[in-house]
Image (tube, rainbow, N blue to C red):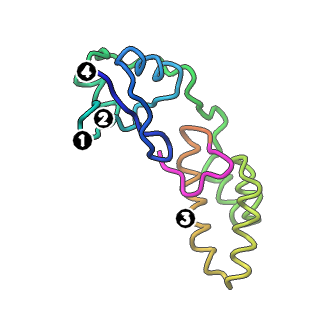
Amino acid sequence: MRYFYADSSNQPIGPYTIDELKQLHLNGTVRAENWVVEEGGSQWQPYSNLIAIGGGIGAAMPPTTGIPTNNSAVSAGTAIVWFLCCLPVGFMQWGQSAKGWIWLLASIFTGGLAGIAAIIDYWMCFSVQQKRKVGEWEFFPSR
């Protein structure tokens, strides 16, 4: 049996055998939240479901080596202080300097309207960075 997995752009990649898919998971390319579908199938499911039902991959979760984590997560207090003091500095905490300055400029040019989206993005970055590192241009990141 062979499977496709969806990359971060929701493009199908594959097909891969179960052993190849397992290796991709072990090296961090495929994560538990990636969607997979059996070759010729139409029902996508999270890779974690495939692991849970056995799927020939094994019921135990493989070690998380290769999956980027964030060992220096920013506290809620620090995030709030930097948001109130200077939005770009707040985004710099997560390695998103350019994005912070773009949000600031967009807020100025739109009379503050873009500030609403910036607040939402800031909160989502804060939430996600508690578990993993956030990418430079990862707008509205999800878990």
Q: Is residue 36 within the magenta segment? A: no
To which residue does mark 4 refer?
55
Q: In the rendered structure, which amino acid carries the disc numbered 1?
A: Ser
To which residue does mark 2 refer?
37
Q: Of circles 4 and 1, which is in front?
A: 1
In the picture, the disc for residue 103 is none
To which residue does mark 3 refer?
120
- What is the CA distance from the residue labelled 4 to the residue labelled 1? 16 Å
Give the percent coordinates (x, y) of residue 14: 42, 30
Q: Residues within 10 Å of mark 4 (few under 14, many from 20)?
A: few
Q: Residue furthest front?
A: 40
Is residue 70 placed above or below 54 in the rendered structure? below
Looking at the picture, tell me which residue is in the foreground, 30 or 38. 38
Query: At 56% across and 42% down in the image, what residue appears?
Result: 130
To which residue does mark 1 refer?
42
Which sits earlier in the primary sequence, circle 2 or circle 4?
A: 2
Q: In the rendered structure, which amino acid carries the disc numbered 2?
A: Val
Q: Of circles 3 and 4, which is in front?
A: 4
Is residue 57 placed above or below 91 in the rendered structure? above
> Which secondary structure lies at badge 1?
loop
Looking at the picture, tell me which residue is in the foreground, 111 or 25. 25
- What is the CA distance from the residue labelled 3 to the residue labelled 4? 38 Å
Tell whether label 2 touches label 3 (CB within 8 Å).
Answer: no
Q: Of circles 2 and 4, which is in front?
A: 2
Query: At 28% across and 17% down in the image, what residue appears?
Result: 59
Which sits earlier in the primary sequence, circle 4 or circle 1?
A: 1
> Which secondary structure lies at badge 2?
strand
In the image, the segment drawn in magenta is: 134-143
